[in-house]
Amino acid sequence: MDNRSDIRDFLSTRRARITPEQAGLLPGSGRRRVPGLRREEVAVLAGVSTDWYTRLEKGHITGVSEDVLEAVARALQLDEAERTYLFDLARAAATKPARTPQRRGSAPVPPRVQWMLNSMTGSAAFVANGRLDILATNTLGWALHSPMFEAPRRPANFARFQFLDVRAHDYYQDWASAANITVALLRTEAGRRPHDASLRELVGELSTVSEEFRTRWAAHDVRIHHNGVKHFHHPVVGGLDLTYCTLDLPAEGSADLRLTIYTAEPGTPSEDGLKLLASWAATAPEASPAATDRPVS
């Protein structure tokens, strides 16, 4: 796959953020023309020639050994997600693309997954794919994300909601932070699945419509979603500060499924708000989990 522009932009943006002092280099004399490290400085830190690193940063990554990629990752001080993304780009460059972009099969979410979701009555839980489509949820998960499910397009998608629905700015107490995370997750998925036609269409749609998305996409930030805290302002119950944990689910075929569970700290107003949300959902016919099942595609 010709992903040289992604490689070039990713490496150059990582290089630009590191100062010589942060890299442990002695500051040189004279005015610097670049905000971060020079290419020759990265080459020294990685133990390769300047010409070789320059060629790599221009996108010529095919055939580069894992040891060299590890050395570059250390020189650029990449975190876990960024290192994984760099290796994904290298694998994509070495893979011969199909004649037509790939679309993943549309097998349904396994019934056992929905049973598991239904058994979680005190937490908001849902299953999503790498494109951030919500594929299945429990009742409280539907209630928490009810503004997203009100959108006419299906399946519900975090990125479309955040960048195309004006209500998202009220729904997320820190919209900018939530948007940054969403784009970083999509960028990570694009490195993992560069031939995914549906993902390309989503990125193209958002890039065309939203300047906020375009700016963040161009930053080449990546992220692996594990756990954290998110702050919501739900239209029914108000403010909610919820802790979340995201786990990879084993799935058949090529589907990547991720289970996310939101809980509230016991004894807090957010726990009371989550209980109130559960009571509200119990009277809403739209909250049936079966109504939110979506094919894995």
Image (tube, rainbow, N blue to C red):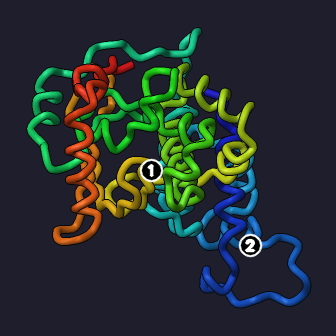
Compared across the picture, whether 243 is left or right of 3 comes to left
| Horizontal and vertical percent position of residue 293 | 28, 22
Against 36, residue 166 (above or below) is above
Tag 2: residue type?
A: Gly
**Quarter assignment of residue 264:** bottom left
Residue shown at 88% from the left, 72% from the top = 33
Instruction: Look at mark 1 in the image and give the residue it sits on.
Output: 84
Q: Crowding at label 1, few (<14), some or many (≥20) Cα neighbours within 10 Å?
A: some
Compared across the picture, whether 60 is left or right of 78 comes to right
Q: Nearer the viewer, residue 31 or 54?
A: 31
Q: Residue 204 carries which label?
A: none
Residue shown at 33% from the left, 27% from the top = 135
Residue shown at 14% from the left, 21% from the top = 111
Mark 2 or 1 closer to N-term?
2
The reply to whether dot 2 and dot 1 touch (C-beta < 8 Å) is no
| Horizontal and vertical percent position of residue 222 | 53, 52
Q: Is residue 170 visible?
A: yes
**Real-space CA distance between mark 2 and mark 1, rounded to the nearest whole angstrom:** 22 Å
Q: Which of 32 and 53 is in front in this view?
A: 32
Against 108, residue 265 (above or below) is below
Instruction: Look at mark 2 in the image and give the residue it sits on.
Output: 36
Against 53, residue 3 (above or below) is above
Tag 1: residue type?
A: Thr
Q: Which of 95 and 107 is in front in this view?
A: 107
Compared across the picture, whether 216 is left or right of 105 comes to right
